[in-house]
Amino acid sequence: MNTIKHIILIISLLTATICYGQDKLLTTKKIINEIAKNNYVAPYPDNFINYETPQYKLYIQLQKTATTDELLKYIDDKRAVVRIYAIKCLDDRKYHKLFQLAVAHIHDTNKVKESGDISRDVYVGDFFVSIKNISENERRQLDSVILYADNKLFYLNRLLSEIEPNEKHYQRISYLAEKNEFAVIPLAKFRKKSDIDFISNKILKSSYFTLEAIEIFPVEPFKKTLITLREQGYNYYGTEFAVAVYKDNFSVDYFNTSLSSVEENDFQKKQRSKYIFEAISKYRDTIFTNLFFKLWSDCFIIDTVIFNYLANLDKERCLSHAYNTLQKPNNLNNSTLVISTMLDFLIANDSIKAKKIIKQNIDSANVHKLSSFVAKAVHFKDYDIINSMFYRLENTNNGHIYIPIVKTILAYKDNELNRKLIKIIKQNIEIKDWVLKEVTENLGLYGLKL
């Protein structure tokens, strides 16, 4: 009797185990089919994408449900997106044969939509070769295989952009450069005179991807290439860096010609001026000094780093330019820091002009610029400036104007000024909510109350 009971129990356990396995297999299959039906690769949530897409949630379920053996069966599934999610799961599990799987899929050029802020088509093979959980030695081997095996992967372009000039790779990179514009940049890193004509022709044919070669290998013949590009109408972002790297009269003449070739208020001139400023800031040299001042006076393009650089080169010209610029501070872009720097420079070197410009802007500056000038008023207990601050207080209910002025007047620690300040605050019934709260807190810092 006991024997019969044991047999029944064993059969029941086997049946339950088989059913569980079948249910699990079906669950994995169902998830896979849903992933395949959606047919796109979802990005991981990160600092830019802070939500989980339905496809990403399916991936998480697959990771929890599928066995490694199941994933290996799907690694060569006829559906491209399934192959991708299989390798993603195996990568996250740190499967020990990831390297072999990646090599086997280097030529997997089926495309799948990768959906994020901007959708794009990506080769399946790119997901395989981008695996993370392989050893450094395996990564080097895999990169070498990709470099020397003719393939269409986007990863190859990234590899080419990062590869250092090693003579053993020269012939291969030279071969790739014949048909792959991304290989022109690593070719330029070898700095071989025999490649100059080839690189120049590539730049003229496909400047967008190859122009950086001039920065890497700035030899005289490429100046003619740059002139030819300009004559052909090519003058896009990146050109200025290729010109500025020479740091000579050619660079200066090129930039002056660029600035004079467009109308005074033309949008293109403003963009071109910004690009030139960025380029000559990167390749800073005294030959660009006059150009820096020209961009500053004509286009109001200046930042703190270059201001300090110019102040060491030509103090008097900086004083004049700073004074003129601060009369129209709204013309400056992203200017809070540089306004503060210019004001400190004026205060230290010409206090009369500094006081004049501070008062002028307290009288008229908009909410975005006012606080920069109010903050510097504390350096001068000048009653023309103080009266201008009180006038602004009496004629505004904007907290972003009100708070900086209150803070500066309190910083004088003058009893008479404090009494006048409190009186004006009480009279302004529009000051309430967060503004009143912050005003009260600032008064409290000096032992004052309304």
Image (spheres, rainbow, N blue to C red):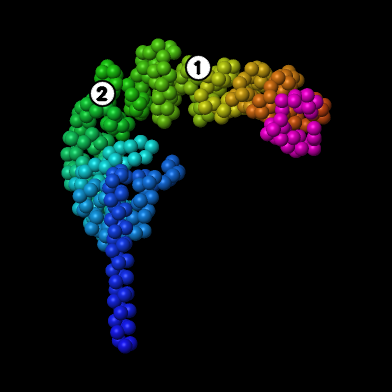
Q: Residue furthest front?
A: 1
Q: Amino acid at mark 2?
A: Thr
Nearer-the-camera pick, 288 or 20: 20
- Note whether residue 137 is visible: no
The stretch of residues the image draws in magenta is 422-450
**Could you classify mark 2 by the number of other residues whose Cα lies within 10 Å: few (under 14), some (14-19), or many (20 or more)?**
some
Instruction: Give the percent coordinates (x, y) of residue 435.
Output: 69, 31
Instruction: Give the percent coordinates (x, y) of residue 211.
Output: 29, 29
Quadrant assignment for the C terminus: top right
Question: Seen in the image, is 200 located left or right of residue 347?
Answer: left
Q: Residue furthest top?
A: 263
Question: Seen in the image, is 249 located left or right of residue 447?
Answer: left
Quadrant assignment for the N terminus: bottom left
Q: Looking at the magenta stretch, what is its main secondary structure?
A: helix
Q: Earlier in the sequence, mark 1 or mark 2?
A: 2
Residue labelled with disc 2: 225
Any mark on residue 297, and which?
1
| Magenta-drawn stretch contains 432 | yes
- Note whether residue 358 is visible: yes
Q: Amino acid at mark 1?
A: Ser
Q: Residue furthest bottom?
A: 1
Nearer-the-camera pick, 49 or 271: 49
